[in-house]
Amino acid sequence: MMKLLVIGGGGREHALTWKLAQSDRVSKIFCTPGNAGTGQLAENIAVAPTELDRLVDLARQQHIDLTVVGPEAPLAIGIVDRFQAEGLRIFGPTAQAARIEADKAYAKQLMREQAVPTAEARIFTEYQAARAYVASRDQAVVIKAAGLAEGKGVIVCDDPADGLLALERVMKDRAFGDAGNTVVVEEKLTGQELSILAFVDGRSLYVLEASQDHKPIGEGDTGPNTGGMGAYTPVPIVTDAVMAQIEREILVPVVDGLTRRDVLYRGVLYAGLMLTMAGPKVLEFNCRFGDPEAQPILMRVRGNLVEVIEHALAGTLDQVELDYDPRPAVCVVMASGGYPGKYEKGKVIEGLDRVAELSDVVAFHAGTARRDRQVVTNGGRVLGVTALGTDLADAQKRAYEAVDMIRFEGAYCRRDIAAKALAGSSPAPSRSA
């Protein structure tokens, strides 16, 4: 029997903990810092994901057999390198490999070297040079802080004049801190977005079924970007041929390119794509499970996630074959009022007990905490209410029925998660992220 440690405290980590706990090989799970949801499945310990010394000590003291890292920040600062140096088993890419997310300029250069289809872009470290370039454009631009910005460092500007304001916000006002020291200015791509997640063992890939995230705060993909307001899987527009093209032209070349740089990538690789008229193009790479994509994907995955992770660590992913629940899954994020801007914490959440009684519905906790005997809000994205359904329309209906059972002051959610797929061939809103 194994003791596991899950690093992180969001919806992705609750979903991972929920799935890992289903393994008959697991005796106990610890979460750091966890949330009110993980606390029902595991022992939460108040250690931040970036407190590497304390995490190493915890793994030793509790005789942890395997650590699974959820968020990008600890990966970027080398938690995997540190654990490996201490002889501790951990799943995730090293700091060098995690640069594919932590440094968008690095990722863009890697894609250029490997001829991976992506948006045309320029990289800038000087504000005046970036300003001059954007001022010379007469088409929509996307301004990206090159560093980690919790999914909020992307600003889509349909008018280049707005691009100038965005540059000032990122590079002068330092809205995203040091993440904006380097900026990537991209063309805006048009099409539908896809999220593709794959387990990687350094050589082989095991690609999971596609999902579609909804980044902007407002319905119809309007307003500022967030960490994600909902997701669904599978995605009807992703045929077997499209998935084969994505693997052949994007995932394999990128892993091969890292290998050419003497970088061993072992963990989960996330490709955020735009399915354009010219085929799939990369918007960004992440070095971990997506959030909220992990919630609906893990609701559908059948099988032992612990064994998949162990195959990835052993370099034997070619032996893995996962089965899926054939029913689609839809995840709707309930957020605090004001998110992704300022919001209040500590609002009492009601109705979770009613949702817990529903079959094939899980309210994955993200920004929650326990206060006395109550569950309260403790973040911008509070819950990821996820449901399986006989078809996509049924999954959407069941997810929103569960959402409507939950109450907290200022609660907000988008009401159009999965609407693009249900609209069939109607034109989808376009953006780049």
Image: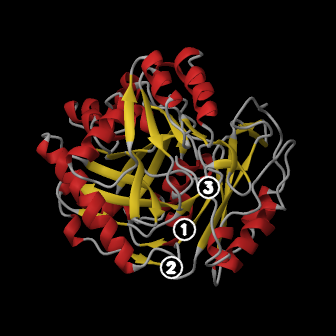
Q: CA distance from mark 3 to mark 2?
A: 23 Å
Q: CA distance from mark 1 to mark 2?
A: 8 Å
Looking at the image, is mark 3 or mark 1 nearer the viewer?
Answer: 3
Circles 1 and 2, Cβ within 8 Å, touching? The answer is yes
* Mark 2 element type: loop
Q: Label 3, on which residue?
A: 214
Which numbered dot is residue 299? 1
Crowd around label 1: few <14 · some 14–19 · many ≥20 (10 Å): many
Circles 3 and 2, Cβ within 8 Å, touching? The answer is no
Which numbered dot is residue 325? 2
| Quadrant the N terminus occupies | bottom left
Which numbered dot is residue 404? none
- The mark nearer the N terminus, 3 or 2, is 3
| Type of amino acid under label 3 | His
| Type of amino acid under label 1 | Met
Which image quadrant is residue 70 in? top left
Crowd around label 2: few <14 · some 14–19 · many ≥20 (10 Å): few
The image shows residue 110 at horizontal and vertical percentages of 25, 42
